[in-house]
Image (cartoon, rainbow, N blue to C red):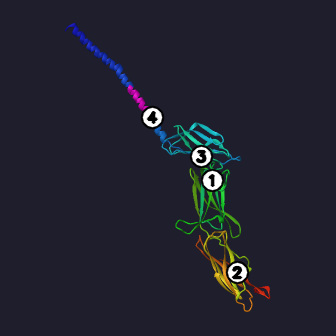
Amino acid sequence: MSRRSRGRGISTVLGAAIFVAIVFTIIFPLMLYMHVLQDLYMREASGRLRYEIERFNEKLEIHVSTGKPDALGRATIYAYLYNPSHLEVNVVAFYVESKLRGLIPIELSTPIVLAPGAQMVYHIPVTIDPDDEVTVRAATARGRSYSAPEVGLSVRKPPYIIFVSLTNMSSRSWYRVIIQANGVVGCVSPGVSINTICQEEANYTIPPPAIFRLFDKDDAKPAPTSYAFFHAMPGSYTVHLTEVFIDDSGNVVENMIASTMVNVTGRDVHLVFELEPKEPLMSMSVLLPSNNTVTLIPDGNPPQGAVWIPFTISLGNMSEPIEDVRVRLSRCTGHNITVVPRISSVDVSYMLPSESYTGSFEVFVQDDSQNSSKGGWIEFEVTVSAKGSFTGSTYGDLATVNGTVYVCVPRRIGGEPVLACNFQP
């Protein structure tokens, strides 16, 4: 083999070696570097995606309440925190938006850690003045912000209502509803109060006349029902129901008949007390204009006319409501005159305790005296009957009253006016 041929062979081998060296020293490291960059990018993208998914799935419920105001009406603020999600939540700050002081940021040196399903009460180191209104937001480590639904919280305007219903109430008793906060968190005021600073306890008394009449949707017999309502901050409360009545000896007796606990968080609360029904203390009074009245009928042949007998019935305030009320002229007797009742009964569909009704009877009167009109008198009796709306009891003689009406005939004898009357001896 010639020298030239051997040189060409060596050049080919050397070129191949150089190419292999370039591949292993430059191309492979570059490809490895590109792979590492791709892996870092995918790791970062995956971590960012996981962070966004966690941020999206993060949930936090926050409600804001106050404690009992001090002598100046200032109250401390508490936050109810609840984590309903499956992720851990770290609360790092609170922001209090005050109507009087503006934005108050509260950075936490140690975050509040809430495990899934955990809840707690946190004392926010801010007081609310009597005329101030605040809104509270909580910020988490994932950058989300949660605002409490109690917007514009004020001790003069607690945001929620505790509505208490009482059924089967006794018409002879008073009822007192008392609400007390359990612990340091909570503030309540009576619903009838206006612009009043809430306290840790409030009460409302329901007198017998405040018992309302309600019908069910199927037109069933009404039940003695009444209501009491209170304005309340979020918190836990105990509701007591006390009955106040007068016993047979005339002593005032106060007896607690029911007690229960309620939690106010994010919505109004409706509480129903169903009581044991009691027999009502029925009383009805019938009033007449006067026990002895005088009515004139025109002179004629014979003298005759109409006599009206007015009346007023009133149901006692400790009675049960009554229905199908009938007021009857149960007896009507004429002396020296003939009487024919024309309107002898009056019906009233329904009456509530302390309610009154006024009506009248019409009686036709004729003077049967011979030769001269002497007049006469009417003796009558008014009877009231009804049915109890609560108990269904029938009261045949709920009230009875007697009265007398004198009938006189004005005449002219010898040109002189004469009033012919015949009074009962």
Residue at mark 2 to residue at mark 4: CA–CA distance: 97 Å
Q: CA distance from mark 4 to mark 3?
A: 36 Å
**Which of pointers 4 and 3 indicates the residue nearer the eye?**
3
Q: Measuring 69% from the left and 79% from the top, which residue is drawn there?
A: 309
Dot 2: element: strand
Q: Main secondary structure of the magenta part?
A: helix
Q: Reading the chain from its start, which is encountered first: label 3 or label 1?
A: 3
| Mark 4, residue position | 47
Q: CA distance from mark 1 to mark 2?
A: 52 Å
- Residue 24, image x, y percentages: 33, 20
The residue where tag 1 is placed is 231
Label 2 packing within 10 angstroms: few (<14), some (14-19), many (20+): some
Q: Say which amino acid is labelled 2.
A: Asn
Secondary structure beneath label 3: loop
Find the residue positioned furthest to the bottom. Answer: 371
Q: Which residue is mark 2?
A: 402
Q: Please identify the quarter of the rendering in which residue 132 is found.
A: top right
